[in-house]
Amino acid sequence: MSANGTSDEVPVRGIPNNERINRLKQHFCQEFGCDPLFFVRVPGRVNLIGEHIDYCGYPVLPMALEQDILIAVAILNKPELHVRNVNNKYSNYETEIKSCEDINIKSDPNGKPFWYNYVLCGVKGALEFLNGKITNGLQLCVDGIIPPASGLSSSSALVSAACLALLYAQNVPLSKSEIASLCANCERYIGTQGGGMDQAIAFLAEKNCAQYITWSPLKATPVALPENAAFVVAHSLAEANKAATNDFNRRVIECRLAARIIATCAGAVTDNKIITLSQVQNKLDKTLREMVDLVYEYLPKDLYTKEEICDILNVNEEELEQLYLTPNTKHLTEFKLKQRALHVYEEAIRVEDFRKHCSQTVSNGNGVNGVNGNNVPNVCENGDANEIINVLGKLMSGSHESLKELYECSHDNLDRLVSMSKEINVNSRLTGAGWGGCIIALCPKEKVNKYIDLLIENFYVKHCKIDKGEASSYVFATTPNQGAEIYVNK
Ligand code: ADP
Ligand code: NG1
Ligand code: MG
């Protein structure tokens, strides 16, 4: 984060003079009786392909949205946190932040996190980074326009914005990748064991290109999207808070157990540490397709009991729980390992294919999707633009099918949106964690308006019985946006 805006640090810009900023400023003033000192803005994201594989160590391909979390911030001269939200359905919250240990992140009696827990995750992460040493605190007022619990990463934008606010207030210089990794770690305080895709794209996104994100070390490589391609996001009208159930963590630990068993059966483990499906692949020095074969060989059953897994791994139940399970998955007794591992390896193949085909986009000599100067690995001659959209679309369709059948994280409304789209030859998939939320569809630019109209009519109006005006707020075309920024009076 530097005022001179080196490309490695979160850019610091002047405060834009627009209606949203002015409204937020006004709200802040009413709440706290003073002006904010600076603003932080962190975007949501849509993942084009590579779902539920970041936490297995595989690359993903998201882009940032225009929709974001914007927070107005002032500094307090005591170590306290005062949090407000422009939306009055989100309650006020105040606490001391003298030390990390003070920050106790507890959910409501039904196990659903309070909204401000996401703010606390970010603040706790920043405090840990600062070794718990601060003498002042923060007043925050949040204005979020990312549809929440919808797979567009509102949670990570909120966590990341809170973390960024505290670090900037404390004058901490951090690179975009450092803060992205910090935020990926601290969002886990909410209870889910996510991979890091959301925080990575939140900070490393660039306008006009998607990013191919790789791990250890974290790196984002810009990917040019076909010039004639449009991406449309459509909400299923079902929300799913990922930290309120154990659906998400169940998938994470099923992948862990699958990885552990493959490694054990192949004679490739020497200790009890958690190993990811990609680490197993590296250890065995196999291709992704060979890993698919190994899944069938070493994980032939549709269902594994806890006892069976203990036998294979030669541990008792207590050790299994302690080594590999999370607090909210300890009580589970049956696990689907073959299906989850197959999804992960095959989805990782689809990501590589998707990226390869993006790099074959037709060049018109002017660059692709306005990415001139963005150092995008380009572009081979004479590709057939619509054919490429077709191939990319098929990969997205394959991803959805796999998420529905093997990963079991779809929802009837998502499946309905995907099949309605297919009826007019538009390929799509659920995006984000699933169990509700949004689809992302790929269609030729000239077809976008017709496609959106069709979804409004057939899905929102006819099937969900909402009126046309409201319906149009649930479906929108989007292009890649930039990552997090700080606004300050210059
Ligand atoms: P997502 O797919 O959007 O990341 P999550 O289940 O991970 O979904 O997180 C959604 C939760 O984040 C919401 O239930 C809410 O607690 C919090 N959240 C998101 N946006 C806002 C906002 N603008 N204001 C307050 N809380 C928000
Ligand atoms: P969403 O749907 O945005 O909460 C989650 C994870 C990602 C990734 C996707 C599935 C977090 C913070 N985010 O995203 O890391 O695993 O699901 O691809 O846990
Ligand atoms: Mg989330």
Image (cartoon, rainbow, N blue to C red):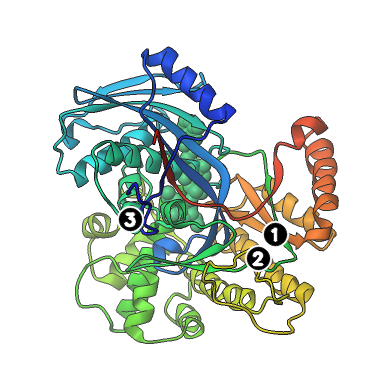
Taking the image as shown, residue 179 lies to the left or right of residue 486, namely: left
Amino acid type assigned to the residue bearing label 2 in the image: Met
Tell whether label 1 touches label 2 (CB within 8 Å). Answer: yes
Q: Where residue 227 sits in the image (x, y, percent)?
A: 71, 67
Where residue 128 appears, as percent x and y from the top left, is: 20, 44
Amino acid at pointer 1: Ser
x and y, in percent, of residue 1 in the image: 33, 49
**Cβ atoms under marks 3 and 1 closer than 8 Å:** no
Marks 3 and 1, how far apart at CA: 29 Å
Q: Which mark, by number, is residue 249?
A: none
**Tag of residue 396:** 2
Image-quadrant location for residue 267: bottom left
Q: Which of marks 2 and 3 precedes in the sequence?
A: 3
Q: Indicate which disc, 3 or 1, sits on the residue closer to the N terminus.
A: 3
Q: Mark 1 points at which residue?
A: 428
Kindly identify the residue that appears in the image at 36 percent across and 16 percent down: 34
- Badge 2: few (under 14), some or many (20 or more) residues near its Cα, within 10 Å? many
Q: How crowded is mark 3: few (under 14 residues within 10 Å), some or many (20 or more)?
A: some
Judge depth for marks 3 and 1 and give the one in front.
3
